[in-house]
Image (cartoon, rainbow, N blue to C red):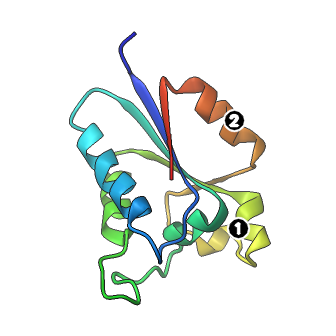
Amino acid sequence: MPVKSVCAVVCRPPVGSRDSWEIMRFSMGLLAGDLDYRLVFAGDGVYHVLEDLPPKTPEGRDSVQRLLEDSLDFDVEVYAVEEDLAARGLQPRDVAARVEVIPARRVAELIRQADATYFV
Protein backbone atom coordinates (compact mmCIF):
# COMPACT_ATOMS: atom_id res chain seq x y z
CA MET A 1 0.00 0.00 0.00
CA PRO A 2 1.52 3.35 -0.97
CA VAL A 3 2.00 5.94 1.76
CA LYS A 4 -0.15 9.00 1.10
CA SER A 5 -0.28 10.51 4.57
CA VAL A 6 2.29 10.87 7.34
CA CYS A 7 2.02 12.05 10.93
CA ALA A 8 5.13 12.91 12.97
CA VAL A 9 4.77 13.23 16.73
CA VAL A 10 7.54 15.26 18.35
CA CYS A 11 7.81 14.75 22.12
CA ARG A 12 11.44 15.68 22.68
CA PRO A 13 12.50 19.13 23.87
CA PRO A 14 14.43 21.59 21.69
CA VAL A 15 17.68 21.00 23.61
CA GLY A 16 19.72 17.90 24.36
CA SER A 17 19.09 16.05 21.10
CA ARG A 18 18.96 16.71 17.38
CA ASP A 19 16.12 14.20 16.87
CA SER A 20 13.36 16.75 16.70
CA TRP A 21 15.37 18.99 14.37
CA GLU A 22 16.02 15.99 12.10
CA ILE A 23 12.34 15.00 11.92
CA MET A 24 11.47 18.57 10.96
CA ARG A 25 14.14 18.51 8.25
CA PHE A 26 12.87 15.10 7.10
CA SER A 27 9.35 16.53 6.90
CA MET A 28 10.51 19.21 4.50
CA GLY A 29 11.85 16.46 2.22
CA LEU A 30 8.47 14.70 2.29
CA LEU A 31 6.83 17.80 0.93
CA ALA A 32 8.44 17.12 -2.44
CA GLY A 33 5.99 14.23 -2.85
CA ASP A 34 2.23 14.37 -2.95
CA LEU A 35 1.74 13.59 0.74
CA ASP A 36 -0.66 14.75 3.37
CA TYR A 37 1.71 15.64 6.22
CA ARG A 38 0.99 16.53 9.85
CA LEU A 39 3.30 17.50 12.69
CA VAL A 40 2.10 17.05 16.27
CA PHE A 41 4.08 18.56 19.15
CA ALA A 42 3.38 16.83 22.45
CA GLY A 43 5.11 16.51 25.81
CA ASP A 44 8.28 18.58 25.92
CA GLY A 45 7.99 18.92 22.16
CA VAL A 46 5.54 21.79 22.66
CA TYR A 47 8.52 24.04 23.39
CA HIS A 48 9.35 23.88 19.66
CA VAL A 49 6.23 25.81 18.69
CA LEU A 50 6.53 28.73 21.08
CA GLU A 51 6.05 32.13 19.45
CA ASP A 52 9.30 33.44 20.90
CA LEU A 53 11.49 30.43 20.07
CA PRO A 54 15.03 31.74 19.54
CA PRO A 55 16.73 30.94 16.22
CA LYS A 56 19.63 29.22 18.07
CA THR A 57 19.72 26.67 20.89
CA PRO A 58 21.86 27.35 23.99
CA GLU A 59 24.50 25.11 22.37
CA GLY A 60 24.60 27.45 19.35
CA ARG A 61 22.84 25.09 16.93
CA ASP A 62 19.94 26.18 14.76
CA SER A 63 16.57 25.75 16.46
CA VAL A 64 13.57 24.45 14.53
CA GLN A 65 12.20 27.98 14.19
CA ARG A 66 12.98 28.31 10.48
CA LEU A 67 11.91 24.73 9.74
CA LEU A 68 8.63 25.35 11.55
CA GLU A 69 8.03 28.54 9.58
CA ASP A 70 8.84 26.74 6.32
CA SER A 71 6.50 23.87 7.21
CA LEU A 72 3.68 26.28 7.91
CA ASP A 73 4.40 28.17 4.69
CA PHE A 74 4.05 24.88 2.78
CA ASP A 75 0.69 24.23 4.45
CA VAL A 76 1.85 21.40 6.71
CA GLU A 77 -0.74 20.94 9.43
CA VAL A 78 1.02 21.72 12.73
CA TYR A 79 -0.54 20.97 16.09
CA ALA A 80 0.36 21.46 19.76
CA VAL A 81 -1.30 19.40 22.49
CA GLU A 82 -3.30 21.62 24.82
CA GLU A 83 -2.81 19.52 27.95
CA ASP A 84 0.96 19.40 27.42
CA LEU A 85 1.09 23.17 27.09
CA ALA A 86 -0.92 23.57 30.31
CA ALA A 87 1.28 21.07 32.18
CA ARG A 88 4.25 23.33 31.39
CA GLY A 89 2.51 26.54 32.42
CA LEU A 90 1.94 27.61 28.81
CA GLN A 91 -1.18 28.95 27.13
CA PRO A 92 -2.44 28.56 23.55
CA ARG A 93 -1.53 32.24 23.01
CA ASP A 94 2.14 31.29 23.61
CA VAL A 95 2.40 29.20 20.44
CA ALA A 96 3.34 30.48 17.00
CA ALA A 97 0.62 31.73 14.68
CA ARG A 98 -0.96 29.05 12.50
CA VAL A 99 -0.15 26.28 14.99
CA GLU A 100 -3.43 24.70 16.01
CA VAL A 101 -3.82 23.78 19.68
CA ILE A 102 -5.72 20.51 20.04
CA PRO A 103 -6.85 18.30 22.92
CA ALA A 104 -4.78 15.17 23.56
CA ARG A 105 -7.64 12.88 22.49
CA ARG A 106 -7.35 14.23 18.95
CA VAL A 107 -3.75 12.98 18.58
CA ALA A 108 -4.94 9.36 18.34
CA GLU A 109 -7.32 10.38 15.55
CA LEU A 110 -4.52 12.05 13.57
CA ILE A 111 -2.33 8.97 13.99
CA ARG A 112 -5.13 6.63 12.88
CA GLN A 113 -5.70 8.71 9.75
CA ALA A 114 -2.03 8.48 8.71
CA ASP A 115 -0.55 5.69 6.61
CA ALA A 116 2.76 6.12 8.47
CA THR A 117 3.65 7.68 11.82
CA TYR A 118 7.03 8.73 13.21
CA PHE A 119 7.75 9.42 16.86
CA VAL A 120 10.69 11.37 18.28
Q: Residues within 10 Å of mark 1 (few under 14, many from 20)?
A: many
Which circle's residue, 2 or 1, is located before the other in the chain? Answer: 1
Residue 115 locus on image (x, y percent): 48, 23
Residue 113 locus on image (x, y percent): 58, 25
Q: How many marks?
A: 2
Specify the quadrant of the image occupied by residue 110: top right
Specify the quadrant of the image occupied by residue 91: bottom right
Q: Residue 108 carries which label?
A: 2
Relative to residue 26, is residue 54 drawn left or right?
right
Q: Nearer the viewer, residue 29 or 71?
A: 29
State the residue at coordinates (24%, 44%).
Answer: 29
Q: Which mark is residue 48?
A: none
Q: Quadrant of the N terminus?
A: top left
Q: Nearer the viewer, residue 102 or 59?
A: 59
| SS of the residue under disc 1 | helix
Dot 1 amino acid type: Leu
Residue 22 locus on image (x, y percent): 34, 57
Relative to residue 44, is residue 56 drawn left or right?
left
**Residue 76 versus residue 33 in the image, above or below:** below
Relative to residue 64, is residue 87 drawn left or right?
right
View extreme (top): residue = 1
State the residue at coordinates (56%, 72%).
Answer: 47
Can you identify the residue that label 1 sits on?
A: 85
Specify the quadrant of the image occupied by residue 72: bottom left
Residue 30 locus on image (x, y percent): 28, 38
Relative to residue 85, is residue 4 drawn left or right?
left
Dot 2 amino acid type: Ala
**Residue 64 versus residue 10 in the image, above or below:** below
